[in-house]
Image: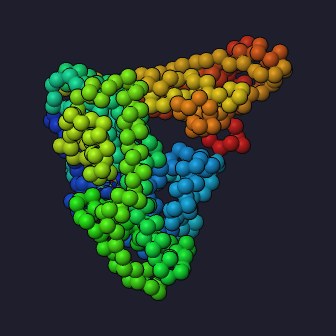
């Protein structure tokens, strides 16, 4: 993250947008690209005449939907059989394919078919924003110390930078792909401690767009008795209109009108959606916002009255219904919207980068926690938690497991993330196999499984047969199961 000795770059690589900020001389500012845009859509388009990024790629999306990638953060690091991958693949116009068990995408560039992982696409986007950051700074960025920070913590840093008091803050970050809720304690304006994080990884601005899109689609299909299933361009146009409709209604319009000539190549689409219709078709989505907020309070054993301030960030926090839901839970608190919701995270990341540098003049300290419990499965499909939710990062925890039948040479186990008691209700991160276990009656071998969670939120799992002291002896990732 550190660009030069005294300039720190903070990047918020979001599902929908990227924002870049710099920290220098005790404060932060966001950077615009050559066209003056401070928010870059997380889009990459592979056209015959080259690649397009950001706003340009988003604008042209409907002309080349199969080769215009977006929202890939929703599937980053996910396995092909993850329900979220299946759900997104069904609604995206580009192809989602299996790459060694992991979700990837397939595009055509210059007549060549290419498979890209979501990480490849993220790195293309990062390289793109790096070029305009260099132009802005007029210096090439040659060094990068990469550190990842939890988004709500970043928002809290941006909010708290010039404050001096102590307070308990709730940060609600509602973006394009996810809803994140954190409770943080700021002490003397210097120490930022995350007490808990909660969220809905499957709720974001895209979901509202999807509902409106389906509303338009059903109307067109029923009126003309046709299916738009194979009309990727038409669906991309409807998606763009759906987002515009949402923005207009969020901004106070009673109705949004749509007029798309030759939507399916033959028929025009003239329609609209009213604010009342929007509220009805999205009612359940709005209601879901309350879940993670209450869960975060519960985890900290706090009453709503113990939260002193609420900070709302992320583009979807601009939906008036979101504030309405929060207001019902927090009738008396100040709900801050004074830091720019699109830019707060990048700014906070830049401040955070500064705290890591040698000249940390503000003497800020940040303590983060593990967002969800981590563990493995044991007989009966139960979750055996190894790292507790809200453990302070970095952390390293071990647990001893054993075999469940006699002379068992091999154990297979899954690495899961989640707070449910049964692993089926949690998310499978990886599957592991430990071979060469000391033979013996069930329950006698001692297998130590260690979870190492580093500062960037990256988990490493290792296992060791304590009787042979052999870790390398066979502990490996299951080659049949991907990652
Ligand atoms: N005024 C507005 N009213 C309602 N929604 C908005 C408004 N402005 C932006 N949005 C929505 O906010 C979402 C993008 O928000 P943001 O840029 O915070 O997401 P992100 O950081 O890319 O995603 P995430 O944090 O989930 O990875 C989009 O769905 C966009 O349509
Ligand atoms: Mg975000």
Residue at image coords 45%, 28%:
370
Which is nearer the eye, 151 or 228?
A: 228
Residue at image coords 65%, 44%:
482
Percent coordinates x, y for residue 439 in the rendering: 82, 18
Q: Quadrant of the C terminus?
A: top right
Percent coordinates x, y for residue 469 in the rendering: 70, 15
Q: Is residue 379 above or below residue 284?
A: above
Residue at image coords 55%, 76%:
227
Q: Quadrant of the N terminus?
A: top left
Percent coordinates x, y for residue 296 in the rendering: 39, 31
Q: Is residue 236 above or below residue 25?
A: below
Q: Is residue 166 above or below residue 83?
A: above
Whether residue 127 is visible: no
Could you say which quadrant of the image residue 63 lies in? bottom left
Could you say which quadrant of the image residue 430 lies in? top right
Which is nearer the eye, 340 or 115?
A: 340
Whether residue 235 is visible: yes
């Amino acid at each position: 993250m550190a660009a030069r000795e005294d300039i720190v770059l903070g990047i918020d690589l979001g599902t929908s947008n990227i924002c870049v900020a710099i920290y220098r001389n005790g404060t932060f500012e966001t950077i615009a690209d050559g066209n003056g845009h401070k928010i870059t859509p997380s889009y990459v388009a592979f056209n015959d005449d080259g690649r397009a990024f950001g706003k340009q790629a988003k604008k042209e999306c409907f002309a080349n939907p199969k080769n215009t990638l977006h929202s890939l953060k929703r599937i980053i690091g996910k396995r092909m059989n993850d329900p979220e991958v299946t759900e997104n693949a069904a609604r995206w116009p580009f192809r989602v394919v299996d790459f060694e068990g992991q979700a990837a995408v397939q595009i055509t560039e210059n007549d060549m078919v290419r498979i890209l992982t979501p990480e490849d696409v993220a790195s293309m986007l990062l390289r793109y924003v790096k070029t305009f950051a260099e132009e802005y700074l007029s210096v090439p960025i040659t060094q990068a110390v990469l550190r990842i920070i939890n988004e709500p913590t970043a928002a809290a840093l941006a909010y708290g930078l010039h404050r001096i008091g102590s307070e308990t803050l709730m940060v609600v970050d509602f973006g394009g792909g996810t809803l994140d809720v954190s409770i943080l304690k700021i002490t003397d304006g210097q120490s930022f401690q995350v007490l808990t994080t909660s969220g809905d990884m499957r709720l974001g601005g895209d979901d509202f767009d999807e509902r409106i899109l389906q509303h338009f689609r059903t109307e067109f299909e029923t009126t003309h008795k046709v299916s738009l299933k194979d009309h990727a361009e038409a669906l991309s146009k409807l998606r763009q209109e759906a987002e515009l409709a949402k923005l207009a209604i969020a901004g106070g319009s009673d109705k949004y009108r749509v007029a798309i000539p030759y939507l399916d190549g033959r028929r025009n689409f003239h329609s609209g959606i009213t604010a009342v219709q929007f509220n009805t078709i999205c009612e359940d989505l709005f209601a879901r916002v309350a879940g993670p907020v209450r869960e975060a309070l519960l985890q900290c054993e706090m009453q709503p009255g113990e939260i002193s301030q609420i900070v709302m960030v992320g583009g979807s926090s601009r939906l008036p219904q979101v504030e309405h839901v929060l207001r019902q839970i927090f009738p008396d608190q100040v709900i801050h919207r004074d830091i720019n919701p699109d830019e707060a995270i990048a700014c906070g990341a830049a401040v955070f980068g500064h705290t890591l540098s040698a000249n940390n003049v503000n003497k800020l300290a940040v303590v983060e926690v593990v967002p969800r419990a981590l563990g493995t499965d044991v007989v009966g499909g139960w979750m055996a938690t190894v790292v507790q939710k809200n453990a302070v990062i970095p952390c390293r925890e071990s647990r001893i497991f054993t075999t469940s039948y006699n002379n068992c040479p091999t154990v297979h186990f899954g690495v899961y993330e989640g707070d449910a008691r049964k692993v089926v209700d949690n998310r499978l991160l990886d599957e592991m196999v430990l071979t060469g276990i000391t033979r013996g009656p069930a329950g006698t071998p001692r297998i130590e499984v260690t979870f190492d969670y580093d500062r960037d939120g990256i988990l490493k799992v290792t296992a060791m047969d304590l009787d042979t002291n052999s870790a390398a002896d066979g502990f490996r990732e299951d080659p049949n199961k991907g990652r």
